[in-house]
Image: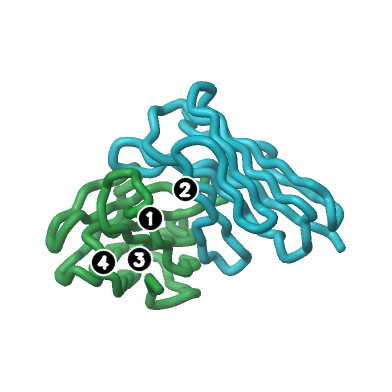
Chain colours: A cyan, B green
Amino acid sequence: KNEVEQSPQNLTAQEGEFITINCSYSVGISALHWLQQHPGGGIVSLFMLSSGKKKHGRLIATINIQEKHSSLHITASHPRDSAVYICAVWSGNQFYFGTGTSLTVIP
Amino acid sequence: DVKVTQSSRYLVKRTGEKVFLECVQDMDHENMFWYRQDPGLGLRLIYFSYDVKMKEKGDIPEGYSVSREKKERFSLILESASTNQTSMYLCASRQGLAGGPQNEQFFGPGTRLTVL
């Protein structure tokens, strides 16, 4: 049983396209995180959300607490956005991670 | 900047060897974590530590042990490495266990371990 489900698993887009990655979760949470992992392994935090919407540059993250759903949007995608995007929820005293969405943006 | 560093980026070991993976953080964080990451399974928690000499098992502790003798350092030990422990290992740290923005979790760069 996966507490966090992400879709799609893999995504290929043309440069400039609008991209959406979805995350659904089944546990009560105190925060939801969107993480980015580039080839080579290091993970960086993009957003931490507990309600509403956040925007950073071309990235937008939204969360609907009632529906237990979050989306990560990338506007005007660029090849440097190619990475694995991971949804993670903090529940109790631990993280539950999605399996990640591998995004490839083609020039 | 918070820095979480791991001793090796790539490591190749033989079956049966004892393997040490070291993690160091420089922000005086209370809590440190070891995860492994496998394709299709995501990150899974092996062990975490909430204080010096304190540890808790995560979801997949079998075949692993940990050591936290100093606050800044958290070591993962594979007592007798096996091929099914070939994986990416990620260390992380955070100050508190509440979910607020003051407790952002920081990850190390990862160690890709291959056991032959």
Question: For mark 1, what is the residue?
Answer: B104
Q: Amino acid at mark 1?
A: Glu
Q: x%, y% of residue B14?
A: 43, 70
Q: Residue at x 34, y 70 (%)?
A: B21
Query: Which quarter of the figure is the C terminus of chain A placed in?
Result: bottom right
Q: Chain of mark 2?
A: A
List the residue tagged with mark 2. A48
Residue type pointed to by label 3: Gly
N-term-proximal mark, 4 vs 3: 3
Q: Earlier in the sequence, mark 1 or mark 4?
A: 4
Q: CA distance from mark 1 to mark 4?
A: 18 Å
Give the residue at the far left of this rendering: B53
- Res B16 label: 3
Which residue is under mark 4?
Answer: B74
The image shows residue A9 at horizontal and vertical percentages of: 67, 42
Q: SS at mark 1?
A: loop
User: Nearest the camera: A82 or A77?
Assistant: A77
Mark number displayed over residue A46: none
Element assignment for label 4:
strand
Crowd around label 2: few <14 · some 14–19 · many ≥20 (10 Å):
many
